[in-house]
Image (spheres, helix red, strand yellow):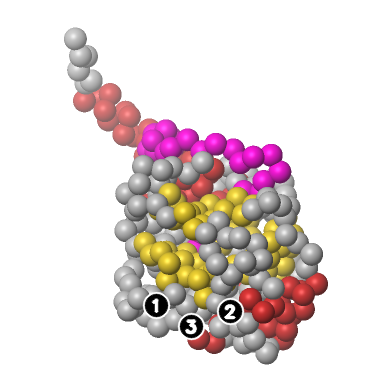
Amino acid sequence: MFKIIRPRAWIALLSMMLVLSATGWYFRHSLQGELQKLTLPKVEPPPTGTLRFAVIGDFGSGSPAERDVALMIESWKPDLITTVGDNNYPAGAAETIDQNIGKFYHAYISPYKGRYGPGATTNRFFPIPGHRDWDSPNGLQPYLDYFTLPGNERYYDFVWGPVHFFMLDTDEREPDGASATSIQGRWLERKLAESTARWKLVFAHHAPYTSHKVPDVEYMRWPFRAWGADAVLSGFFHVYERLLVDGLPYFVNGSGGLWVSDFGEIDARSQFRYREDYGAMLVDASDAHITFRFVNREGRIVDEYVPVKGQSREKPTRLPQESGSVAK
């Protein structure tokens, strides 16, 4: 027989949940969060010697969708998390940055001085600025105060395993410019030429190519391939898209938590498009190969791409949008 729970018990349970929510414990350890983790597909660890990282874009809203994506990323146990900008909506303010970023990703940030729990001992969270991060009355200062990053912190590079990450600031308010011939552009050209890494990935908030209903950002059509990049990862447009332009893969990854938008006229170079749900990219890289996946917040792989080093033709694996495949 089923035992009837008395009204007082329900009131006590609800009261406890409200108290936990008020203390900030609710997100990581609430019944809702724990149950959601149990429903996510199991993600197997990558092979030995493989770097695993996540890429999120246009996410910093504090929304339930951002929480869902963060829980999924946590289940992957990535070595690090990267972003493609717009980390702190609506306008990059100091008052909102911790609740939009630290609440969900504090365990990867070092040094972390926010209120949502312990941070990482070594920094494993590497963002780039988006245009919303520049929109505060103090410009990019709240972002610069919150993170501790290499170089001038607006744009920088670092190597982790077989990947060299080139993290750009593509906003036109960037003091060193956002054109191919700017100080920043020449810095990237030189750094790519000097790099001996197996994979060279460029992160740039403003997407040079897209099929989004809003036109793409033409000033970011830098000669990335000629300079030696293996892929360009962007955000700005709130969709997921993969394009192949002159043999170089471009990813638009802007559905990390704020809202999902619409496509317009389809670019002939577009290889795959998705706008049905929020999600993030899961990337596995070894000396032998690199695999890019877009995974929706239900844990389903909706796109998978494996480029062939040194060849201009792609060899993608396309999965139906409602495929039963899961991230592993």
**Sequence-wise first label, 3 or 2:** 2
Amino acid of disc 3: Val
**Sequence-wise first label, 1 or 2:** 2
Residue 257: x, y in percent? 41, 59
Task: Please rate how many residues cluster around mark 2, counting C-alpha atoms within 10 Å: few if below 14, some from 14 to 19, many from 20.
Answer: many
Q: Is residue 19 visible?
A: no
Q: Which of 249 and 163 is in front in this view?
A: 249
Task: Please rate how many residues cluster around mark 1, counting C-alpha atoms within 10 Å: few if below 14, some from 14 to 19, many from 20.
Answer: few
Q: Give the range drawn in magenta.
A: 31-58
Tell me the number on the disc at residue 217.
Answer: 3
Residue 294: x, y in percent? 46, 55
**Does residue 46 belong to the magenta stretch?**
yes
Of the two numbered discs 3 and 1 in the rendering, the one whose residue sits closer to the viewer: 1
Distance of label 3 from label 2 (alpha carbons) = 10 Å
Mark 2, residue position: 170
Q: Seen from this angle, which residue lies furthest bottom?
A: 181
Mark 1, residue position: 267
Distance of label 3 from label 1 (alpha carbons) = 14 Å
Amino acid of disc 1: Asp
